[in-house]
Amino acid sequence: MIDHARYATLKPRAFSYWLLLLLCAAMVGIGGYCALAMEHAGHIITGMNNHIVWGLPHVFAVSLIVAASGALNGASLSSVFGLPHYKPVARLSVILSMCLLIGGLLVLVLDLGRPDRLIVAMTTYNFRSIFAWNIFLYTGFLAVGVCYLWMMMESRFNRHTVVAGRVAFAWRIVLTTGTGCIFGFLVGRNALDSALLAPLFIALSLVMGMAVLVLFFVILDRWHSPVLNVQLLQSLRRLQVWFLLSLVYFSVVHHLTNLYATEHHLVERHTLTGDLSGVFWLGHILVGVLLPLSLLTIRSINVGEISRLVISALLSLIGAMALLYVVIIGSQSTPQTLFPGKTVLNSQFGDAGFSAYQPSIWEWGLGGGGIAVALLLCLMLLRILPLLPERLPEIPTRPDRSEK
Amino acid sequence: MSSSAPNQNNAQIARRSFLQRLGLLGVAAVAAPALLPTDSNGQITTLKGVSDKHRWGLLIDSSKCAAGCDACVRGCNEEHGISSTGNDDTDAQWIRKIDLKDNLTGQLSSLPMMCQHCDSAPCVDVCPTGASFKRADGVVLVNKHTCIGCRYCVMACPYKARSFIHEPLTDQKSWAPRGQGTVESCTLCVHRIDEDNEQQPACAVACTDEAHSAILFGDLNDPNSDISKAMVERQGLQVRSDFDLNTGVRYTKL
């Protein structure tokens, strides 16, 4: 299956490209400074403590990693599911996916207590650890992504694109399952001890991936048309509706099973009616699911209504991060049950009550830096590699363009 | 051109030889750990005197543990150079006191909680670099040289027994190396064990000094040891026995 479409590098004339590039570079600088400060002074300058050991940087890192897996949707829909209208944007999908993963991994690494020992993590493995397996899954994903892109870009190897696409698709499913299992394997934490976290994370990756693809395509369409057309827009809308429904399905089932088990009631009370209820109900359910679903299902999206798709994508991303905040922070702020059947009257180390967490500016900086690295890398690669379709063959062009 | 051909050939041979040596080195590096002596659990037993003949543990009698007394905590902190910064949330907590009330009977109890030195330790399972490890004699420790500070073990510990070091440390004890950005927990005073099997951990000594004698240390593998006999007589229970971790720290009158 030879790809006859022609591709070009990004030749930006828009002021907004340079502005975004500059903003990203500045944010990368800020993120780097925050990481240096955290390494020098220690995590004492963050809002994390020995109750909440994984804080906001983990929320950002996991968001980026999960979104990276989902961003491959565009390429998978073309290579694996044979949807022709995704073919022109398949390269963009792969490159965005890899950049997001690099951004997420960078945040994860720089949030380590000893980031200078990265070489230890890369050379000393405990294969009983799902964390160690994930190191292979993440680096492997990058390698598979490079091969996949190579098969797409080198006309001699185009016939292998489908195989590479299937491998990449399988890999991203395993990768997201592995990321979900990092949390799901923690039997000592009532909020996390669930196999449902793996499919929940897969649904989350589909939602986040589709949302970042929409934003990415819309921005590129402004700088370098044509990237979007009606067919692609409608497909993105329909798929995002299904992905959002699958996310809320797994989320509801997760909480219902927890509500059924008495041992999980404390966690559920904390999430549904306690300190995190605002993040859960407003962030995850309202902003992350109900509003985007409403925007996407009122009526089908026409070209003039791209803003509806963009807003729903932004809301989905905010909601997805809110859900990850509830999963990651909520699981730690709820006291661990050490003595079932007993009430903790006093503890020298907060076994009796919920723990508070207030992220510091350093954590926001590091997390934002990760997003900026992903974007910056992407913007630069778009200028180097021919990733953008020069035209969209055999697909109806956008009405507003055909009129011109 | 003709003179460069032999040089090129030599360079190829040299490169091939280099690659061969590199390959041999790689095979040796992979095979070496497999050649190290291990015990029945697959633990490396290069440390002198450490073997699975012993399994060190504690038996804590919560009926003897007095509410409001934290002598064990102070003893541990003093022994290992753990000082308070005034922020309990970020300070290291190798051992802590917990007061409990039974929901049915209303019975009150008090006990110290520390690393339970599990046989199937979740912290050891999840550590990506293997820095969290269990010695052949059952003591669970952190290798300070390979801990990368990912805190996954803190997340995995069902007993909240691990602490991450949030800030620079000073005045460390030579027998208790600690470090900013790494994780630590109760070592069962392993330096005392390695020096002399008859020595008691600092918490047990402090408890005895306060005339409570609630903490009994000894060899769980020796059926004639005081701890083994007491374990049989008083039925030492595991905290969260449902996890089936076969803890080295047991409690009575829980």
Image (cartoon, helix red, strand yellow):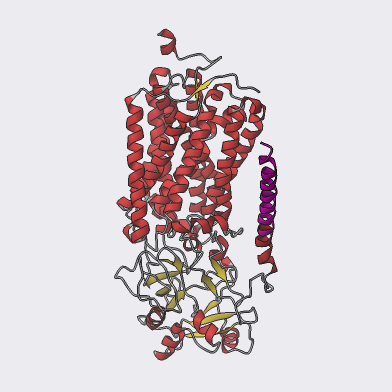
Task: Residue at 58%, 75% (x, y): give it.
Answer: B138
Does B40 sit left or right of A69 as displayed?
right
Quarter of the figure with the C terminus of chain A:
top left
Answer whether residue B108 is magenta in the image. Answer: no
Quarter of the figure with the N terminus of chain A:
top right
The correct choice, above or below, for B123 with respect to A115 in the image is below
Task: Residue at 45%, 57% (x, y): give it.
Answer: A116
The correct choice, above or below, for A13 with respect to A102 in the image is above
| Extreme residue toward the top, this view | A403
* Extent of the magenta region: B1-25
Place of residue A379 in the rendered image (x, y in percent of width and height, measured from the top left): 42, 32
- Tell me which corner region of the image, top left, top right, bottom left or bottom right, holds residue B89: bottom left
Place of residue A183 in the rendered image (x, y in percent of width and height, measured from the top left): 51, 53
Place of residue B56 in the rendered image (x, y in percent of width and height, measured from the top left): 57, 80
| Extreme residue toward the front, this view | B3
The correct choice, above or below, for A131 with respect to A21 in the image is below
Residue A67 appears in view: no
